[in-house]
Image (cartoon, rainbow, N blue to C red):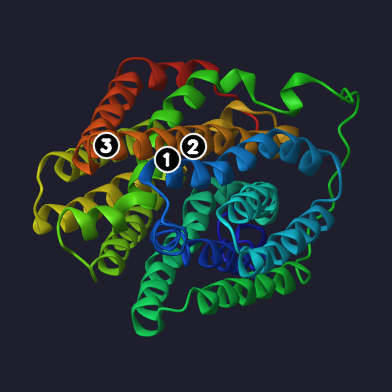
Amino acid sequence: MTGNKVDKLWNKEYIKVMTCNFLLFSAFYLLTPLLPIYLDQKFEADKDLIGIVLSGYVIATLLVRPFSGFVVDTFDRKTVLIACFTLFFICFTGYLGATTLLMFAIVRTFHGIPFGATTVANSTVAIDVLPTSRRNEGIGFYGLSNNIAMAIAPSVGIYLYHATNNFSLLFWLSLILSFAGFLCSTTIKLPHRVPVEGKKKISLDHFFLGRAWLLAVNICFFGACWGVMSNYVALYGQKELNITDGTGVFFALLSAGLIISRLQGAKSLRAGKLTSNALIGVLLSFIGFTLFGFIRHPWAFYLSAILVGLGNGRMYPAFLNMFIKIARHDQRGTANSSILISWDLGMGFGILIGGFIAEAIGFGAAFKTVAIFQGIGMLLFIFFTGKFFEKRKLNEN
């Protein structure tokens, strides 16, 4: 089939879905590293309180994921995607009107609902528009849209913050980016889906892919590490290393690592080498988080960004493909929501515990804990999870 039109990876609809994802995550990452600073400056919130406020977003995202998978697998996916994107961009107006910490916490928490639903819907639509023979590879490339957004958006946000000290401008920019994503989602054309005969209307596996439970546990550990690093890196660099303008560089290096590793890993993903891709990624990430947590120096700060990026760029698409390989073809939405649930659960825990540890002992202790979590996740994968996947994967495409 190679060379036929059906095998074309970069088809028009796939590019549109990638663009939607890029705009979604650009709006998200524009604010992510700056919100702890915003809460610290505007509301004089303590580190543990900042952790609680920011974790609310992740908790809301986590709660909506299972229902998102069910809705995406049950109803028209384009309609679901457009509805979710609409709510996502509207929520940015709430930040502009939040004049107290409680109001901000409510808006931030509620915003997690459309974010969680939109990411599930968009990634499931991406699978639908990919040809079967290029799916593993295409899923790996799909994540590039996240990574490029992460390379650009935090740097732009931090630059604008230092140039203007105007958070309202950043909130408006995120609103505009998310609205552009909504407009793009309305132009996507999806292939017809054949209803599955005899499928139960409601069952547990519509909400979470139980067959992938150990994969889910494993990804939780990695999500916790990512949650602490992505949310507290700006404050850590500012307060512990006296790096005031380096967070944008950190995210750019992190994203460069993610992009390079996804490009390098595409060929092996296409060949179905999922466990080897994941193992390489897990090992690189462990080295990066260990360097970040145990060596307090600017060169370690920046080198760890590259290593963590290289690691996660290999690990995450491999894990996503593993979830999909364990699921039936009519459970793609559930597979997507399941890995995101697991990642968000880990992130939420990481943000929360990271804030408490940073307040009680310091950021150094928080990031040492992160390195330990990554090590536990690495050992779990090496000794158990890889074998678990090989036994449970299905031959369905």
Residue depicted at 72% across the width and 69% down the height: 182
Q: Residues within 10 Å of mark 1 (few under 14, many from 20)?
A: many
> Is there CB contact under 8 Å for labels 1 and 3?
no
Residue 179 showing in the rendered view: yes
Vertical arrangement, residue 180 with respect to residue 193, above or below: below
Residue 272 showing in the rendered view: no
Mark closer to the chain start, 1 or 3: 1
Residue 24 rendering spot, x and y as whole percentages? 59, 63
Q: Which residue is mark 2?
A: 348
Q: Secondary structure at mark 1?
A: helix
> Is there CB contact under 8 Å for labels 2 and 1?
yes
Q: Which mark is residue 297?
A: none
Q: Amino acid at mark 1?
A: Ile
Q: Which mark is residue 366?
A: 3
Vertical arrangement, residue 167 with respect to residue 353, above or below: below
Residue 327 lies in quadrant: top right
